[in-house]
Image (spheres, rainbow, N blue to C red):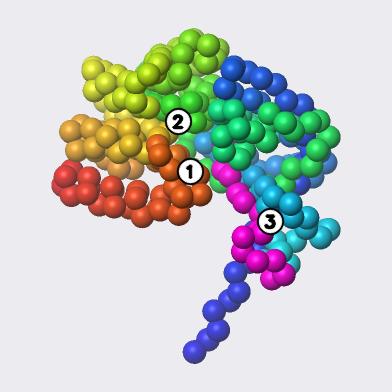
Amino acid sequence: MAERPSRKAPKINEARVVRTERLTPHMVRVVLGGESLAGFGVGEYTDHYIKLLFPAKGVSYPEPFDMERIRAEFPREQWPSTRAYTVRGWDAELGELTVDFVVHGDEGLAGPWATRVKAGETVRFLGPGGGYAPDPAADWHLLVGDESALPAIAAAMERMPAGAVVHAFVEVAGPEEEQKISTPDGTTVTWLHRGDATVGSQLVGAVRDLEFPAGEVHAFVHGEAGFVKELRALLRVERNIPRERLSISGYWRLGQDDDAWRAVKRQWNEQVEREQEAGAA
């Protein structure tokens, strides 16, 4: 039997923090730069993402940084943690990569880091990945998400072709979390203020109440997994929208931390898709 080829170690990108900015009470922008980002491969998709590497608490790694060496020499619990974040923008001329972070105090890993990090600090990450950009041939576009999906929705809005029909719904905690976002033709986001309601409940209601325009839709629905599941059923089963016209995924799960959710996310999404494909058949 032929030996299985060894898995190629992913390329580690290294950058430095250029500046940070508090956009809203719960959104912090971090701009990365440095010579190593020259020719960085983003631009095809509006949901490009990178996976930031965070050292285990109290652990220092040998230089030059080498994931293969770390995996060989350090116990699993001391490997760096990864967190995926959408690329909000890429300025090829300046060589600057912009990433926005949702912050809820000391909760989580990446959010608190974004509030503390200073200009000049080194950042390592994997990527980019991605798979969605607005289809210019679509008759209309549907963009739906909570604040975790806001960077990708904002990037998609700014990429819309001239004359595009766009219905964009973003749910945030309150009016203080709104941002100025529009398409080239001036179409704006419909902001939904969550208040004390369950995350995503207003998004489900807004899409259910929407009078769908005629023609073929291209939809992007991302955010908390519970409401994403409801909207997947609404769009696939009730509205009979083909799977290939949907970019839909649960970024996070209410009641689970990031590590716990990532451990079951693939199985969750596959099970939900099987159930709803059967319903749409």
Q: Nearer the viewer, mark 1 or mark 3?
A: 1
Q: Nearer the viewer, residue 37 or 93?
A: 37
Residue 134's disc is 2
Q: Secondary structure at mark 2?
A: loop
Cα gap from disc 3 to disc 2, whole angstroms:
28 Å
Amino acid type at image mark 3: Lys
Q: Are marks 2 and 1 in contact (CB under 8 Å)?
A: no
Mark toward the start of the polypeptide (3 vs 2): 3
For residue 198, above or below residue 77: above
Q: How many marks?
A: 3
Q: Which residues are magenta?
A: 72-88
Residue at horizontal 29 percent and vertical 52 percent from the top: 271
Q: Quadrant of residue 89?
A: top right
Q: Secondary structure at mark 3?
A: loop
Horizontally, is 194 left or right of 75 in the view? left
Mark 1: few/some/many CA within 10 Å (<14, 14-19, 20+): few
Horizontally, is 15 left or right of 273 in the view? right
Q: Nearer the viewer, residue 50 or 246?
A: 50
For disc 1, the marked residue is 257
